[in-house]
Structures are given as C-alpha cells and as structure tokens.
Image (cartoon, rainbow, N blue to C red):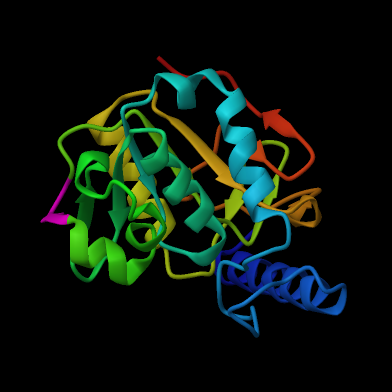
Amino acid sequence: MKGNDIFIEKQELRERIWKEMEAKGIAKFPLPCFGRIPNFKGAEVAALKLRFIDEYGSASYMMVNPDSPQRPVRRMALLDGKVLVMPTPRLKSGYLVIRPEGVKGKEREASTIRGAFKYGESTDAPSHLDLIVEGSVAVDLDGNRLGKGKGFGDREISLAEDIRRGITVATTVHDIQIVDSVPREEHDRKVDLIVTPTKIIRVRPKIL
C-alpha cells in the first residue's frame, strides 16, 4: 500500500472515531473532539486501572502525554509519589519534569499544562524513564496506535525507548477506540498495554 493511501486510511479512521465518540456522548471537554486526542467519559477509571500493572507499581519516573484524557494519569502519578515527565504541547518547549515533593497538595494544578509549566523543570530530554503513557485516537489489539496525525506521540515513544530499552508503553482509551486494525507505517510506534475503563490488555511481550 502506498504512503498516500495509508495517510488517507488513517484520517478516515480518525474521523470515524471522533464522529462516533461525539454522536454517542462519550467525548468530554474540550469539544469538539475532532483534531484532538479525544477526552472521554471514564478516563479517571482507566487511569486508576494502571495501578494494577506491575510496571506502574515499580515506576519512579513516568512520561505522560499532555492531552486532556491523560490528565488523571498525570495527577495520579504525582499523588503516588512518582516523578512526572510531561512533553510540552507539540514539543515546542521540550519536556517538563515535575517532582512530587514540590507539588504536595497541588497535584491537581500541577497535572495541567499550565501547572506543569509553573512547577516543572524544563529539559530537552529526561535522563531517566520507567514507563510511558500515551494518548491515542485509536488502537488495535496488535498494539498499533493512531494519534492525531502530527507524529508527536511517535517521537515521544522513540525518545523513551532510547532512554530505556524495552520500556513499557501504555495507552489509556475508551473501549470504543479499540478497532480491528490501525493502518501502520514503518515509523509508527506500537504500545504494549491498552487500558480502558473496563479492561487491561497486554498486547505483546516486553522486549528486553
């Protein structure tokens, strides 16, 4: 399949997911969800399910993307005493490192983009990572992930894999975002874990 054909298939899948989430009332603020990693009802529950995975329990440093549906993950990580690494939107300002001891009682604020800039330390690349959580528009059971089309998620995952070989990559999504197949190109990065409000799916063995 030619690159342009894959691009069209990806965009058609994004449009279908965005439309379906809004039509079924699953999408949450910010709306409309078109063009975004869509926020969804149950994002808080999906975040809490991360606590059931061993990699979360043992992680000291977590990278979590800056989109709205992963804000509960960012807040939970800080409450659980983990160092939070947040990519800045579009990676324009690199990465922000938020240390839990510096935001005691302010975890809700620090989990926002504005709060992360207020309390975080700026860096071009974090020195350590144990787990990465990405947002997705769609994902399939083989771990193929579809973002909003700008490639920032793939860049974040690639950086994390450079820092720690075999790092676990998780995504939190609504069940409706799990699809039969996500079109894939060579540069696209996969996820290891899919966490929804109802289930935890480990899609492939961790590579060591």
Please give the name of the residue rendered at 20% of the width and 66% of the height, measured from the top-left corner. Answer: 118
Above or below, comparing residue 1 to residue 165 in the picture? below
Q: Residue furthest bottom?
A: 32
| Residue 205 visible within the image | yes
Q: Residue 107: where, in percent of width, then height?
A: 37, 52
Res 191 quadrant in image: top right
Please give the name of the residue rendered at 64% of the width and 35% of the height, measured from the top-left corner. Answer: 49
Q: Residue furthest front?
A: 105
Please give the name of the residue rendered at 72% of the width and 74% of the height, measured from the top-left corner. Answer: 18
Residue closest to the eye, 117 or 7: 117
Side (left or right) of 164 relative to 167: left
Residue closest to the eye, 10 or 42: 42
Q: Residue 197: where, in percent of width, then height?
A: 74, 45
Side (left or right) of 94 relative to 90: left
Check if residue 81 falls in the magenta segment. no
Q: How many marks?
A: 0
Please give the name of the residue rendered at 48% of the width and 57% of the height, measured from the top-left corner. Answer: 71
- Give the overall secondary structure of the magenta segment: strand
Q: For the C terminus, give its image quadrant.
A: top left
Q: Residue 131: where, in percent of width, then height?
A: 40, 32
The residue segment tinted magenta is: 121-125
Q: Residue 5: where, in percent of width, then height?
A: 64, 69
Q: For the N terminus, give its image quadrant.
A: bottom right
Side (left or right) of 141 relative to 180: left
Above or below, comparing residue 156 to residue 36 in the picture? above
Q: Residue furthest top?
A: 208
Residue closest to the eye, 4 or 39: 39
| Residue 94 visible within the image | no
